[in-house]
Image (cartoon, helix red, strand yellow):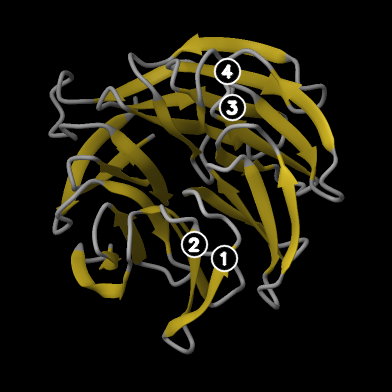
């Protein structure tokens, strides 16, 4: 029996929070949104630590790549700020995009950083030198999300034109366009075993694609409104979805059954507005929202 209990609420942001990301250092969480700064939290004792650095505009994406003392913040103005934890300052400003940056991911295998923008391109940067290596035109419209498979040889981009574009991560050649969603694709995530790809859209549908031939396996009408984020548990066979409908849902990773709905309607002291991002810390799920809060949930499987 899967049970959920709210254990903490982190407050202090004055505006909606769009992104949360765990630090490489255990017990530390970063958050950013429509505020004037990027915030550091201690999630062991649920306290505010400090504002890491001021930002000129909204933060839509935060990424802390494993094995690097770096944090990347993607901004609404198209800039990516690079904060070096050893030097304790912003050391680089990656300036390629002039429209909002919506997602940032990295490949440890290739030492590369991928940045997705509203301009329809994905820029690829060296994690060693911060040099721009490539820029690929993925869509005539916004690229909203990036998913890299566990083998790090495939990457999927969710686009506002409702398509999911799959590329070879080795040479960035296109492999397939996944057609099925009817609205913008906001989230994509490969399963931990690499066998399938999940995509979630503004059309509220959750789609399951075979990661070998990219055929559609299953379509689930998962939420009432847009699916903003999908995230697999790091070790348990479950994944969570966050939605504009103010709910979080927990699903089985193999049977795709719905096991839990976390919402005010179901009696939980949950978010009052759109749930934007999730992150797992062992069996704790952290969620953030337009309601300016971060909530910590203890999940018992």
The alpha-carbon separation of the residues under discs 3 and 4 comes to 6 Å
Badge 4 density bin: few <14, some 14–19, many ≥20, Cα 10 Å: many
**195 vs 111, nearest the viewer:** 111
N-terminal-most mark, 3 or 4: 3
Q: Would you say residue 233 is visible in this rendering? A: yes
Check disc 3 and report its element: helix, strand or loop.
strand
From the top left corner, tell me how far across and down residue 46 is, in percent: 20, 62
Q: Is residue 277 left or right of residue 264?
A: right
Label 4 sits on residue: 207
Are circles 3 and 4 on residues that touch, CB within 8 Å? yes
Disc 4 and disc 2 in contact, CB within 8 angstroms: no
The crowd level at tag 1 (other Cα within 10 Å; few <14, some 14-19, many 20+) is few
Q: Position of residue 106 (x, y in %)?
A: 64, 57
Say left or right for 122 vs 134: left
What residue is shown with label 2?
A: 79
Residue 256 appears anywhere in the view: no
Q: Residues within 10 Å of mark 3 (few under 14, many from 20)?
A: many
Disc 4 vs disc 2: which is toward the camera?
Answer: 2
Quadrant of the frame with the C terminus = top left
Tag 1 residue: 95
Q: Which residue is mark 3?
A: 198
Residue 134, above or below 251: below
Q: Position of residue 217 (x, y in %)?
A: 67, 13
Q: Which residue sits at x=49%, y=56%?
A: 78
For marks 4 and 1, give the CA distance: 34 Å
């Amino acid at each position: 029996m899967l049970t959920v209990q709210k254990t903490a609420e982190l407050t202090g942001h004055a505006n909606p929070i769009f992104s949360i990301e765990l630090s490489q250092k255990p017990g530390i969480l970063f958050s950013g949104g429509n505020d004037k700064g990027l915030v550091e939290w201690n999630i062991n004792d649920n306290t505010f630590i400090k504002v890491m650095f001021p930002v000129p505009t909204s933060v839509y994406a935060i990424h802390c790549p494993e094995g690097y003392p770096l944090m990347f913040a993607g901004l609404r103005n198209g800039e990516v700020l690079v904060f070096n934890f050893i030097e304790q300052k912003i050391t680089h400003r990656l300036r390629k995009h002039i429209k909002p940056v919506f997602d940032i991911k990295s490949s440890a295998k290739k030492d590369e950083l991928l940045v997705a923008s509203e301009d329809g391109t994905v820029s690829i940067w060296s994690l060693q030198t911060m040099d721009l290596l490539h820029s690929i035109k993925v869509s005539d419209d916004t690229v909203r999300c990036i998913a890299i498979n566990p083998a790090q040889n495939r990457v999927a981009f969710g686009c506002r034109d409702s398509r999911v574009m799959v590329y070879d991560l080795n040479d960035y050649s296109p492999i397939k366009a996944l057609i099925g969603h009817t609205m913008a694709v906001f989230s994509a995530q490969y399963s931990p075993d690499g066998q399938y790809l999940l995509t979630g859209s503004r059309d509220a549908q959750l789609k399951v694609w075979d990661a070998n031939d990219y055929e559609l396996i299953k379509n689930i009408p998962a939420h009432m409104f847009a699916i903003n984020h999908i995230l697999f548990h790091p070790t348990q066979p479950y994944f969570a979805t966050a939605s504009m409908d103010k709910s979080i849902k927990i699903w089985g990773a193999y049977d795709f059954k719905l096991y839990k709905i976390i919402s005010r309607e179901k009696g939980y002291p949950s978010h009052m507005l759109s749930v934007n991002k999730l992150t797992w810390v062992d069996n704790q799920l952290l969620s953030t929202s337009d309601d300016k809060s971060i909530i910590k949930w203890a999940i018992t499987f």
